[in-house]
């Protein structure tokens, strides 16, 4: 099933000059970029994005971190995009993230784990509405018949 997922290259990824390499991984996989922007969010916005973690002891630090500098928000589309992207991102705690995943290759600490990705269809819909209220794009790609098959 075609899905859309919200992905953030968090402020550590921007500061470490990893934006291009992270996006390239998703492009290489064949996922379609349907939204992309560089934003510096304020505390109110960050608290809405991470509302589910409001009661966690790390919440204040998480909000401070995500508002500490610009980040890159993107919307990615493809077959099973939500689980495909989560698998590419790797486990939340980088010491548990498999090599070959983004966190497993680029991160060491849970507080600086580089990337966010929607964890399910409902979360993805809510996160895309929050980060891309203007909507995302639809467009064909010449390579789609090779990546997605002849019926695409
Ligand atoms: P996820 O990003 O893999 O979906 P979540 O459990 O949704 O992981 O947590 C959201 C974010 O909160 C994590 O990516 C990480 O940055 C931060 N976080 C989660 N657990 C901890 C913790 O124990 N200490 C500090 N930060 C944490
Ligand atoms: Mg999460």
Image (cartoon, grey):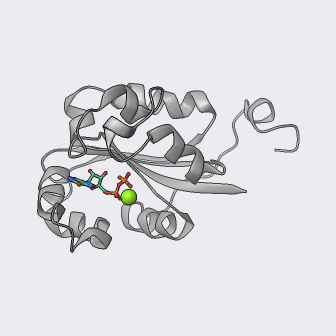
Up the image or down, 44 lies above or below 88; here it is: below
- The percent position of residue 114, horizontal first and vertical second, equals 30, 39
Q: Quadrant of the N terminus?
A: bottom right
Q: Is residue 112 visible?
A: yes
Up the image or down, 149 lies above or below 54; here it is: above
| The quadrant where residue 62 appears | bottom left
Q: Furthest residue to the front? A: 96
Q: Quadrant of the C terminus?
A: top right
The residue positioned 45% from the left and 40% from the top of the image is 89
Q: Is residue 133 visible?
A: no
- The percent position of residue 130, horizontal first and vertical second, equals 38, 67
**Nearer to me, 89 or 145:** 89
**Nearer to me, 39 or 26:** 26
Q: Furthest residue to the right? A: 150
The residue positioned 32% from the left and 36% from the top of the image is 95
- The percent position of residue 8, horizontal first and vertical second, equals 36, 47
The residue positioned 48% from the left and 26% from the top of the image is 100
**Image position of 34 (left or right of 90):** right
**Image position of 36 (left or right of 60):** right
Up the image or down, 91 lies above or below 57; here it is: above
- The percent position of residue 7, horizontal first and vertical second, equals 42, 49
**Image position of 121 (left or right of 112):** right
Q: Number of callouts in the render?
A: 0
**Image position of 140 (left or right of 62):** right
**Quick check: which quadrant has ligand 1?**
bottom left
């Amino acid at each position: 099933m075609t899905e859309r997922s919200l992905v953030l290259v968090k402020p550590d990824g921007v500061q470490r000059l990893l934006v291009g390499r992270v996006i390239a991984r998703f492009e290489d996989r064949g996922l379609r970029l349907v939204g992309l922007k560089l934003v510096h969010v304020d505390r109110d916005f960050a608290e809405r994005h991470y509302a589910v973690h409001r009661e966690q002891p790390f919440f204040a630090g998480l909000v401070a971190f995500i508002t500490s500098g610009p980040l890159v928000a993107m919307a990615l589309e493809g077959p099973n995009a939500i689980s495909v992207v989560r698998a590419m991102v790797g486990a939340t705690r980088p010491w548990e993230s498999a090599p070959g995943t983004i966190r497993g290759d680029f991160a060491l600490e849970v507080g600086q784990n580089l990337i966010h990705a929607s964890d399910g269809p409902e979360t993805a819909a809510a996160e895309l509405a929050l980060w891309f209220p203007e909507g995302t794009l639809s467009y064909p790609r010449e390579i789609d018949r090779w990546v997605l098959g002849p019926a695409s």
